[in-house]
Structure formats: C-alpha cells, structure tokens
Image (cartoon, rainbow, N blue to C red):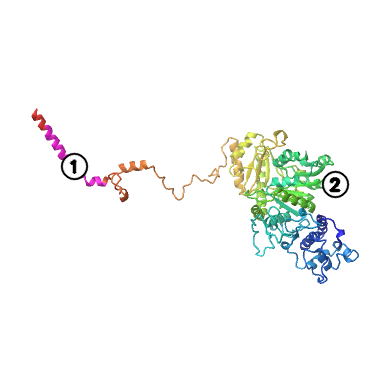
Amino acid sequence: MSAKARGGEWDCWAENTTKARKGGDLSARRLENACWRLWNMDKQSASPSASATPKKIRSCGSLANLVAAAGGDSGSEDGPGSQDLSLNPNFQEILKVAIGGGIDFTTCRFPAKSDNVRYDDLPTFPLRPNFAAFRNSLHPASECVVFDGCPEDPYHPSNTPIYQTATFVQPSCSEFGAYDYTRSGNPTRTALEKHVALLEQAAAAFAFASGMAALHTLMRLLRQGDEVLVNEDIYGGMHRLLTQDCIYSGLIVTFVDTTDLIAVEKAISPRTKLIHTESPSNPRMKISDLRGLAEIAHRHGVLLSVDSTMMPPVICKPLKLGADIVIHSATKFISGHADCMGGLVCVRDPEVAHRVAFLQNAEGTALAPFECFLFLRGIKTLHLRVTRAQENAEQVAAFLLSHPKVTAAYFPGKGGCDAKSLAIHRSQATGQGSMISLTTGCVEFSRRFCDACRIFKTTVSFGSVNSLCEMPCTMSHASIPAEQRTLPDDLIRLSVGIEDVRDLIADLSMAFDIADGRPPKVMPVNGVYDSRFEDLPCVPSPAPAPRPRHQEESTRATSGATSEPSESSEASAPIQPRRIAAFAPSLVLTAFSATLAIAAWRGQRRLAR
C-alpha cells in the first residue's frame, strides 16, 4: 500500500468504516479503525527493519509494519505492497493475525509535530470502536447493563471510576498520550460516549454540558448562509436558539410541518443543509416519518437530525432509520432522576464525528466527569424505568380519554393520534413512551388542575422517575412569543413516572375534582405529599424551650421552699425561703416585744395628758 493511495486521515477512517460494515466481527473492526488512523500518523516513517518477523507486527503504531507482516512492501510501488490491502476479502483476518493480541489503546502515542498531520486533527481521546454496523447479540435490557466502561483499567473496577482531574501527565514534550486535558477528553466521558454510541448504533457519540449545548453544537455544523428546515412544533429552547441566536450568525431558519413530506420537499432550497425534527414533537406529540424524511434529505444532499429526547434508544434508534444525527437531552430519560444536566450528539458519519469532536474541544462544552458518572449509572436502569413508565402511561392515557373534562389527549398510542400517524410511529419505535399532552378547553381550569396535583409535581423537564406536569405556554415554551406559538393555551403536558399507577390516577382524579370546584371523590388520607408529616407526633419528644431569665427569677420568688440554692451563688443571691424559715421564731419574738413597747409608750402619753 503506497502513501499515494490514500488521502487525509479522516478519509481513511470513512473508507474503513464503509468496509467494516460488511463484517460482523467487532474486534476486527476496532483493529481496522485503529490501524487506519495510526497509518496516517506514520505514513512517512521508514520501513521496518529486515528482522521483522512475518505475521507479527512489531509496533502497534506502524501500519507499514503491518503491511510488511502481511507480505507486502510499503515502500515499493511495483511490489505486492502497491496493491490496496484493504481490498483483500481477508483483510480483517490479516489484521488480527498481524497484530496478534490486539491493540492496547491506552498506550497509543501521537506525535506532537508531524509534517503530514495538523495539530487539530490529532485525536483528543483514545481510539474507540465504531458501533454504526454493530449488532449486539444482547437484548435491550441487557444492553443497558452489560458494558465495561474501562476495560483497559488494570484493576478491573465493577463501575467506571470518576477521573476527577483537569490534566494528564504526558509521555514527553514531543508526544501526546491518550488524554492531556479533560476539556479535550476524559476516561469517564469516553466510557459514557462509548456506551451511548453502542445503544444508538452510532459511529461516535459526544457528551455535552446540557441539551442546549448539544443543540447549539448541531447548529455550529452549519455556516453563514446555510438554511435549516425545522419542525414547526419544536422544543421552546430550540426555538429560542434558532430565532434569537442562530439568525445573527447568518443562518436561515425556515419552519415547516415535518409530518407533511410533500411540504418538506417543496421547502428545500439550494441553501438547505439540514432538516431538524422531533418525533413525537414536544409538546403536541406530532409524528414524523423519519424514514421518509431521511430519503428526501439524502436525495437532496441534506443532513437529517432528530431530537429523540422523548424516545430514548431502548424505544427508538433514529440512526437505523436513516437519520444522520441524533440529539438527546440526557437530563431527561438517560439520567432518569433529575439530578444532573447533559446533552448527547450521536452521529453515523465519521467525518461529521470529526467536526463534532473538534467543536466539543474548541468551544469547551464537554460534560464534566462527575456528571458522566451519574449518566453511566442512570443508563443501567434506563430500560427498567422506561418500561415501567410506559406501562403506567398507557393506563393514565386510558383514564384521560374517558374523563369528561379532557377535550383532547395527544400521545403516540391508540386514541392519542390518527391511524396513519400511529402506524408510522409503531414502524419506527417499540412503544408509545411516557409523555401525554391534553387540553381541557379552559386555561384557568388547566391551571387549577396542575396546582391541585399532589403526586404530579409542577415542573419543567420530563423523563424522571417522578411524575411531572406543566403548562408549556407558561413554562417550557414560554420563550416562544405568543403570536408565533402553535400550542393551545390550555395545553397540559404530563410526564408519567414509575409510581404505582393507582396512586397516579387517584391524584389526577382528585385534581380534576378540585379544579372543577367539587369535593374530591377520592381523597387520600394524607392529602398533601410534601413529606413534612406535620400531623404525626415527633420522636423523640422535643425538649421545652429555655425561658427568659426574668421569668425564671419570678418563678423562683413564688414557688415556695422547693429549690436548693447553689453554693457558688449563695453570697449574691437573695435570701431563699428555707433560710427565712430558720430565723422565723426569733423574728416573731422580736416583733412581739416591739409591739408591747410601743403600746406601753402610748399608754404613758395618755396618762401624761
């Protein structure tokens, strides 16, 4: 294989990815990916020495050695090495034989200066597998749990450690190690990004500090003058980003109903570079045909991105349906506990992955190690949580559809959308999720309903183990100007959690009654779930509060002979009742004698007159 036969590093990676999809051996694909990237680093290096043992590579950092080991001469234009080794149908097997036990990705080193590689093209994290063609033999529930985030760790921890460090010591001043700076890469973040890529079957996934940071990075893939077509029913934060930020960067933003494929294709112009949608949309739960959108987009050379936050990867994998980029607000279902914020960008094209990796590093929007650890923990229970919440949502939806105060309910299930939309959703997802929107016909009634809920917490966001409710027009989508909103003002959005569904339905029933001004039919014994429990006795019993000093002295003066004075205060304290009692007899005699003396004196004065 001659150096002239190849272009840039990422071209090699892209070509390799295409070939790797033909095989089913993950180890072979990992080795192939690693070798192609390492080849670009040393394609101008000298040929290996004659002492190289055939069929055994001397250095994992030299593709020239690999070619020689496979029977070719990398420096010869006319010899066997001039043939494109990757065209050999047994190339993967040749790689495995030549490399032997495999590559220790943590020991890969990259030159800081090279004539053929730009600094910004150097990887900022260790080589990682491309999961775009990966077919996991495990079922979705196991896929969330069976994953080792740090297989190279010599101590083999059961859980991925938190690498809470800003910097990493480098092997030398002229080489980079696997990591150098946590903004650029961190082992805990690598573990999260690999696991998410596995779940989404992506070439690569990238973790960001928030869902909005992920969406902003998506928009940064475009350039001034590019156009993006966006679903008209979109998350309020995304609407704000597009209409109050991106337009000032020279992007053209056009809103279109992505459920109408004909309208989408008509809206595409020569400047269109991206179509962005949600399915189901937030919060009207409108269903878009992702396969149809992907076909239209690719026919016109346009990328398709899908915000799949409402449909986590255990329910839907948009990349398998033809999408190029998938966005998640990991704060929702990936976390599942509303205790950390993050966003994810998953891509299936290595060239797009290269650009996203660059933006993540250059703009400093990557997720911190501790949050990565929390998301890794959340993924382990993702399937359990989503399954339970979805089961609850189905029963809650049935209750809402039968309630007289509900004028309409929206969800990707029977009774929540039309038959065509339901068929499309079921063809691209394995469940309806746990999100439900409803209208009541009255804004004030909807407000009273939300305020009356006790188990359903009134808050923005969704996807938590707790059930949540909100009114989008005044909360999550309030940033959209009223004249631009396509939402009913009385719309309520419910995020159904994993509580007992009987308690959830009872809570909703009680809220409907209170909002309607009627006494609740079902009133729980403890009607307020604020965890204060103020009606219960305290354990241990609280001690009485100390009284002010003047009250204490007053009590002493009137309490009788019941207390013993302390020796230390005896000199300065007032005479105590017991001490007065000891002198009582003598005091009585003295007083009696004085009385007699006064009476005798008064008698003498009368006689004198």
Query: Dot 1: few (<14), some (14–19), or many (≥20) neighbours within 10 Å?
Result: few
| Residue 196 place in picture, x, y as percent | 71, 54
How far separated are the C-alphas under marks 2 and 1?
121 Å
| Residue 450 place in picture, x, y as percent | 61, 39
Where, by quadrant of the figure, is residue 15 drawn?
A: bottom right
Furthest residue toward top: 609
Left or right of residue 530, residue 122 in this image: right
Residue 507 visible in this rendered orientation of the protein: yes
Closer mark to the observer between disc 2 and disc 1: 1
Furthest residue toward right: 78
Q: Would you name the residue on which mark 2 appears? A: 299
- The residues colored magenta run 578-602
Query: In the drawing, what numbered circle is on residue 588?
Result: 1
Query: Dot 2: few (<14), some (14–19), or many (≥20) neighbours within 10 Å?
Result: few
Classify 549 as above or below 375: above
Amino acid type at mark 1: Val
Where, by quadrant of the figure, is residue 96 drawn?
A: bottom right
Residue 146 visible in this rendered orientation of the protein: no
- Asked if the magenta segment contains residue 65, the reply would be no
Classify 250 as above or below 342: above
| Residue 48 place in picture, x, y as percent | 82, 67
Q: Residue at x 80, y 45 (%)?
A: 293
Left or right of residue 509, residue 486 in this image: right
Q: Between residues 106 and 242, which one lies in front from this camera angle?
A: 106
